[in-house]
Amino acid sequence: MSYSTTTLLLVLAYVSFSTSAAAISTATLVETPPINNTLYIISNAERPSLRLPGLTPVGFKRSRNCLPNVLAPLDIGLIVSCPYDARTGLCAETVETIGPTAKKLGVEVNATCVAGQDADDDCLYNLISGFGKKSTKAVLIVWDILDFDGLFESLDIDDSTPEADDSDDDTPHFDLLSKVVQNEVTSVVSQGCAGLDGQAPGSFRRSLRAARGYSKKIQKKERILSRVVGKSGQV
């Protein structure tokens, strides 16, 4: 093999390697496209302590008497929830919470994406973006209040705003309705259920952050209480 031929082959190999490396580098820089459909996010309605099954009387009223009327005008074409996980107790009431609304809208609840540590990071995004390829209707997400952090992270939702003065309040609020456009929270309002909700104006952003931060604290408390109940044999 001549010197010129060897040089040519080396040059071609270098060009090929450089092109492949550039392609890989470019691929790593490509971000996941934002979801184009408007998202509405709510948590499960009020439930008993100690992870007892079902909704409280207040949660029952919210689910059946309020949410169908509040959510009906939002042009919802897909309802996403998480299935009940018997091991962690997550999502025991999410489908029950949204059942009456789904029936009124004539939209089936899709509960294929699990919550918690076993969640597939791409499941929700793939489900919603796939729906977005064939419809511009809004998507309603009904998620366990204890896994709001996981939900927001899996969809890369940005809710960064200046903290309110009362941001230390860690009380969970089940009345929040969050609107997300292009991966950014654009509004957080109360569902305004008559006889149930009466939150002070200006506190909704703090409450959303409280719902996300509430998760770790309440899970630890419930694990301790569950062990106590298990040892005593009482419900």
Image: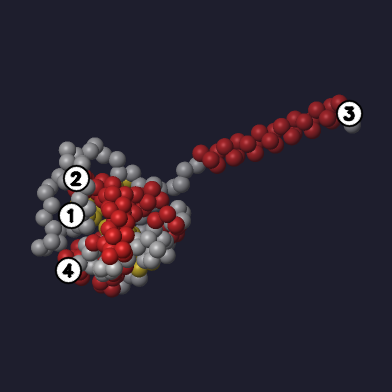
Instruction: Tell me residue 41's x, y (percent).
Output: 29, 56
Instruction: Tell me residue 100's x, y (percent).
Output: 25, 71
Q: Quick check: marks 3 and 2 in contact, CB under 8 Å?
A: no
Secondary structure type for disc 3: loop
**What residue does disc 2 label?**
169
Gap in angstroms between the C-alphas marked 2 and 4: 24 Å
Q: Is residue 83 visible?
A: no
Q: Residues within 10 Å of mark 3 (few under 14, many from 20)?
A: few
Q: Nearer the viewer, residue 32 or 196?
A: 196
Instruction: Tell me residue 175's x, y (percent).
Output: 20, 57
Q: Quick check: marks 4 and 1 in contact, CB under 8 Å?
A: no
Which one is earlier in the sequence, the residue at label 3 or at label 4?
A: 3
Q: What amino acid type should be assigned to the residue bearing mark 4?
A: Pro
Which residue in the rendered view is the most extreme toward the front?
A: 232
Q: Nearer the viewer, residue 51 or 175?
A: 51
Secondary structure type for disc 1: strand
**What residue does disc 4 label?**
57
**What residue does disc 1 label?**
190
Q: Residues within 10 Å of mark 2 (few under 14, many from 20)?
A: some
* Mark in front: 3 vs 4: 4
Which one is earlier in the sequence, the residue at label 3 or at label 1?
A: 3
Q: Residues within 10 Å of mark 1 (few under 14, many from 20)?
A: some
Q: Is residue 67 left or right of residue 113?
A: left
**What residue does disc 3 label?**
2
Which residue in the rendered view is the most extreme toward the right?
A: 1
**The C terminus sits in image quarter:** bottom left
Q: What amino acid type should be assigned to the residue bearing mark 1?
A: Ser
Q: What amino acid type should be assigned to the residue bearing mark 3?
A: Ser
Q: Residues within 10 Å of mark 4 (few under 14, many from 20)?
A: few
